Image (cartoon, rainbow, N blue to C red):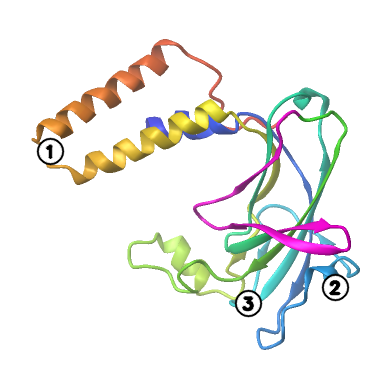
Amino acid sequence: TFLRDCLDPAVFPLWVPLEASAQQFTDVKAEPPKAAEIVSGTFTPVNPGWGWGPKWSTCWFRLRGEVPAEFAGKRLAFRFSSGTEAQLWAREGSAFVPLQGFDVNRDAWPLFDAAVAGAGVEMLIEAACNHPFGVLGFEWDPAEVHARWNGEHPGRFEYAQLAVHDARAWELRHCYAFALGLLKELPETSNRAQDLLGSLRRATNAVIARPRVLPGDSKV
């Protein structure tokens, strides 16, 4: 669709992977460790696609990298997905504070309004091996989702990126998605639905008529 193939990739048009490592805690009955305790522990390097678990367990991820020269002066975001719910932590003095949760609906945190080339990046993520509704899939989920959550390692480290964030594309993407959702709820033959459909078509044609860089997988 236009939303998935054109607008979604335009929000984060360029990105570089971050170095990822993990520290697992598989005893689901044990008290989860605190962020301050984690930093002195042993992290093992992991790559995208790495599965972890079991269900309800905890895994801490450490992500490291630096701003490439190509990103200097640009607005950058940190993007992350563990295939589960997760929490981003930041160090403030001698303490750690939570910044934002991550799940299937949220995978980005703003880092720099105008990045400096060579600036270091280090993020700490606490991931819980469950999704927002527990550890079971819904009947409408794809077979792959059910198979994953029925397995021993349903967690899935999917990506950790330092990405250029296009704020205008973000606004357009969410306005367009909201309009599509509203259109689905309106009676198809209503005047409001027809007006909204016409507006969506004009917006789509306007973007197509004035092409811009809309890469689908623009790793630097």
Mark 2 and mark 3: Cα distance apart in space: 22 Å
User: Alpha-carbon neighbours of circle 2 within 10 Å: few (<14), some, or many (≥20)?
Assistant: few
Circles 2 and 3: CB distance less than 8 Å?
A: no
Task: Identify the image quadrant of residue 78.
Answer: top right
Residue occupying image coordinates x 37% and y 15%: 206
Task: Identify the image quadrant of residue 37.
Answer: bottom right
Mark 1 and mark 2: Cα distance apart in space: 56 Å
Question: Which residue bears the numbered disc 3?
Answer: 54
Question: Which residue bears the numbered disc 1?
Answer: 188
Q: In this rendering, is residue 64 above or below 128?
A: above
Q: In this rendering, is residue 190 above or below 139?
A: above
- Taking the magenta stretch, the answer to whether it contains residue 165 is no
Considering the whole magenta stretch, tell me its main secondary structure.
Answer: strand
Compare residues 77 and 14 and report the one nearer the observer: 77
Question: Which residue bears the numbered disc 2?
Answer: 37
- Region rendered in magenta: 89-114
Element class at badge 2: helix
Compare residues 9 and 74 and report the one nearer the observer: 74
Which kind of residue does numbered mark 2 sit on? Glu
- Taking the magenta stretch, the answer to whether it contains residue 93 is yes
Which of the two discs, 3 and 1, labels the residue nearer the N terminus? 3
Element class at badge 1: loop
Q: Position of residue 41 (x, y in %)?
A: 88, 70
